Image (tube, grey):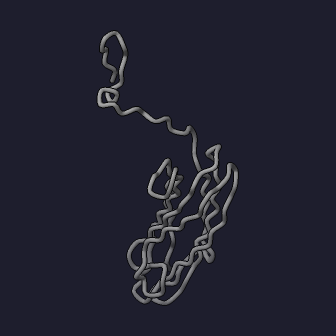
Amino acid sequence: MLFEIYGESMGFLDIFGKKEESKPAGIPFKLETRFRPIRLKALGESKTELLIDLQNMGGEDVLVSLVVKLPDKIGFDTIGLYRAKEIRIGQMGNGEGKNLNIEIFGSSKTTAGNYEVEITAFSHYRDYGHVLNSVKKKVTLRVV
């Protein structure tokens, strides 16, 4: 939405003195995941590893963090108390890759079915409080 003020074309936010920031084009990360073993055992204590391969495709060095969220009945500990995990990876160069292994546990209250695991990779500027861009991926973990 553009306005014409004194012969000068302005965007809507320019009226309030806020400038639009340029966003980096393209996908900032390549995010590949897999489970080892590929499923959990229902109604018993079992564990699997979520293997994450993360590669910086943004074209410049960035500060990176990763957030993994789990649904109810599975967790990052044996009783399923912790269901969200933030991993601060640090500075990643252009094209640099990181491999992460995250343990996921099932318990006696884990019923059979499909569980959706949400993984979000963030690129930051200045510090971890300022998000520049992100990539989100949802994967399904089977429990039999």
Residue 54, compared with residue 26, is above or below; it is below
Task: Where is residue 120? Give x, y as percent.
Answer: 49, 59
Task: Where is residue 10? Give x, y as percent.
Answer: 36, 21
- The residue lying toward the viewer, choosing from 122 and 143, is 122
Q: Quadrant of residue 25?
A: top right
* On-image quarter of the N terminus: top left
Q: Quadrant of residue 51?
A: bottom right
| Figure disc tally | 0
Task: Where is residue 40? Give x, y as percent.
Answer: 53, 80
Residue at 50% across, 89% down: 45
Residue at 31% across, 14% down: 4
Horizontally, is 141 left or right of 111 in the view? Answer: right
Horizontally, is 66 left or right of 7 in the view? Answer: right
Task: Where is residue 13? Give x, y as percent.
Answer: 33, 30
- The residue lying toward the viewer, choosing from 144 and 88, is 88
Residue at 63% across, 75% down: 36
Q: Residue furthest top?
A: 7
Q: Quadrant of residue 54?
A: bottom right
Residue at 49% across, 35% down: 22
